[in-house]
Image (spheres, rainbow, N blue to C red):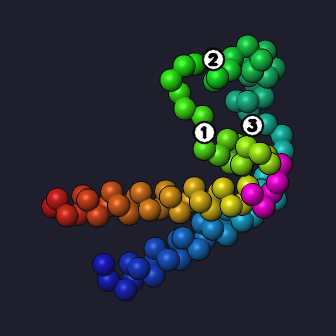
Amino acid sequence: MDKKDITLIGVAIVICIIICALSPYIASGDPDGLEKSAEDSGLAEDFSIEEIKGIPDAIFPDYAFANAPDNQVLQVVALVIGTLVTFGLGYAIAEIVRNRN
């Protein structure tokens, strides 16, 4: 990887972390269209993911820590962790593919 690629990746990570830091403060508290439609039709109460066996619980449900879902600082931490893990997995996959070729 040359210096331009490393700079581009660094800038992309910084932009993503800035978006992560701001998103809990600017995101709407109202449910999205799909969630709102499910609530209006009564499906939200009728269906629960816990009813399906074999599906593990989310690590960060609703982009927050389970013990403090309304804490915006912890939401930022969860988003940053998710972003860094995603970039790390993407980089690892790219390295594996590159080494195979």
Residue shown at 78% from the left, 52% from the top: 27
Secondary element at tag 1? loop
Q: Residue 32 carries which label?
A: 3
Going by the numbered disc 3, the residue's amino acid type is Asp
Residue annotated with mark 1: 58
Type of the residue with mark 1? Ala
Q: Mark 3: which secondary structure? A: loop
Dominant secondary-structure state across the stretch colored magenta: helix
* Number of residues whose C-alpha sits closer than 10 Å to that of mark 1, classed few (under 14), some (14–19) or many (20 or more): few
Q: Position of residue 18 (x, y in %)?
A: 67, 69
Work out whether mark 3 precedes mark 1 in sequence or the reverse, and give the earlier one. 3
- SS at mark 2? helix
The magenta span reads 70-74
User: Is 10 left, or right, of 81 in this rendering?
Assistant: left
Between 43 and 73, the residue placed more toward the observer is: 73
**Nearer the observer, disc 3 or disc 2?**
2
Which residue is disc 2 drawn over? 51
Q: Residue furthest bottom?
A: 3
Tell me which amino acid carries mark 2: Glu
Q: Residue 51: horizontal and vertical position, in percent?
A: 63, 17
Answer whether residue 8 is magenta in the image.
Answer: no
Tell which tag, 3 or 1, sits nearer the viewer: 1
At 75% from the left and 64% from the top, the residue drawn is: 22
On-image quarter of the N terminus: bottom left
Give the quarter of the image for residue 25.
Answer: bottom right
